[in-house]
Amino acid sequence: MADYDYDVLIIGAGPGGYVAAIRAAQLGLKTACVEGRETLGGTCLNVGCIPSKAMLHASEYFDAAANGSMAKMGVIVTPKLDLPAMHGQRQDAVKQLTGGIEFLFKKNKVDWIKGFAAFTSADTVEVAGKSYRARNIVIATGSSVTPLPGVTIDQKVVVDSTGALELPKVPKKMVVIGGGVIGLELGSVWRRLGSEVTVVEFLDQLLPGMDMDVRKEAAKIFKKQGMALKLGTKVTGVAVKGGKATLTLEPAAGGASETLEADCVLVSIGRRPNTEGLALDKAGLETNARGQIEVDHDLRTTIPGIWAIGDVVPGPMLAHKAEDEGIAVAENIAGQTGIINHAVIPSVVYTWPEIAGVGLTEEQAKERGEIKVGKFPMLANSRAKTNHEPDGFVKVIADAKTDRVLGTWIIASVAGTMIAQVAQAMEFGATSEDIAYTCHAHPTHNEAIKEAAMAVTGKPIHI
Ligand code: FAD
Ligand code: NAD
């Protein structure tokens, strides 16, 4: 029909939406992307993955100089913190990368429609008072911070992840509510820069969803680094007075409450899908009990012509998952076969050391049948040992009968880089023997993956 403005209109320019827009345009579809923020790139580039990694990377250098690990290698320095400069390089990274997406939109002829979109019907949205009709609409509106009932985020004393990236000075005492990915990454940043950090976690272990061995070992490592952990504890209130916070804590299992003082409180108890203001009802769409938009394997919603991807749909809230769904949705719209293997999505916590996993945890794998597990400590890996990085291990989980790799979990300085090898192997349906007999360069951290795979059959060399 001639009266469509676009073949594809995407709502949201995060890693899901901007990637979908570029791929759709590459496939010859007339494409627009609506974004309400001043800059493209969504949560990830503006206030998520990128700025957090800028602060993690810089604070890692500071910590290495301050905690004696550089001195151990004969480099003696006394670090002096220039926090405005550290923030400056963070802002610079964000500016360059978000500007890069704008360049890619121009290069690929994607129209950026500025403003917030709301449906007026199943094929039309309104943005800043103007209507746009599209043959296909992709909802890629992402997620926002889950608030803690009764706790007001003022971005001064009580902050969310966005506020925690921008603190103008190092707080003396910081309390992190939630021992998940954000709490541990941003808690690590400020601990390295000098804060006394306490993490309060409702569950009895950190990092829900990860392998239990990893969760327990991570807790030991963070404690050793000086982070105080209050596990099995919930925050029931935060009162702010005179620039200080008093938190009320209760054991999750019930019992007497206690209080904790802090100069800064980070609320990091999860994120929730963004659907408010979209007027989904005008398109005939509903959300599920968790506020997400349900999609089928092809990323179609229940309404023909409307698709959804990224944090707003079920699944892990990860940028690379959103990106892969962005490519797949565009290819499906163009009549191709968009493929995402939701069973092989790596997840990485960018702390020191890094924590990474792909596939099933040992607990999940055991529930499905008989398994074999091979473990190898980083202490016995020559490169990690030489680099003074003894913490962590690699654990490979394989099916006992077929030997097919079901999952791998890693704690190591470069676990986030190492895990890609296993994801690729799993994508090809590798067995632990395939990994064990693949020649790995020496000396590399990745040799620990080979050794853990050898350990599945009980025959590692270096332990
Ligand atoms: P988003 O990136 O949230 O983008 C959605 C966009 O849609 C936003 O820009 C929003 O303004 C826009 N929008 C919403 N509603 C409308 C509307 N009605 N009209 C127009 N525009 C709209 N993931 C990783 O994989 N690795 C990491 O290291 C990592 N670090 C993170 C660190 C932090 C501090 C945070 C908060 C998150 C991190 N994440 C990380 C998660 C990652 O940012 C998200 O999974 C990812 O951004 C989701 O992409 P998305 O495209 O679905 O949504
Ligand atoms: P999360 O779900 O990872 O962790 C939240 C934690 O808060 C959980 O452990 C939960 O048990 C705990 N919690 C909930 N209510 C509590 C309470 N009242 N008191 C104490 N603890 C409580 O959520 P997050 O850390 O906020 O991160 C949000 C999302 O962002 C995650 O889904 C994650 O995938 C994504 N993210 C990813 C990365 C990465 O890939 N490196 C980095 C940051 C964020």
Image (cartoon, rainbow, N blue to C red):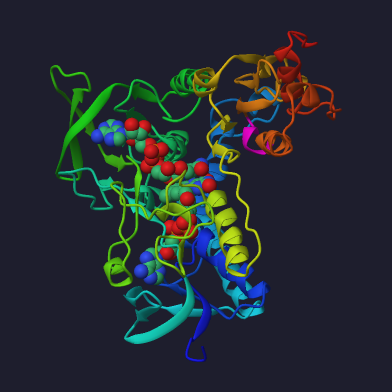
Identify the image quadrant of the C terminus: top right
In x, y percent, where is residue 435?
Answer: 78, 26
Q: Residue at x 57, y 59 (%)?
A: 93
Q: Main secondary structure of the magenta part?
A: helix
* Nearer-the-camera pick, 193 or 436: 436
Q: Residue at x 38, y 22 (%)?
A: 205
Number of marks? 0
In x, y percent, where is residue 434?
Answer: 80, 26
What is the magenta range?
Answer: 413-417
Q: In screen coordinates, is 439 left or right of 98? A: right
Q: In screen coordinates, is 142 left or right of 262? A: right
* Nearer-the-camera pick, 127 or 262: 127
* Nearer-the-camera pick, 208 or 4: 4
Residue 390 magenta-highlighted: no
Quadrant in the rendering for residue 425: top right
Residue 321 seen anywhere in this rendered image of the structure:
yes
Q: Residue at x 48, y 57 (%)?
A: 309
Q: In screen coordinates, is 113 left or right of 417? A: left
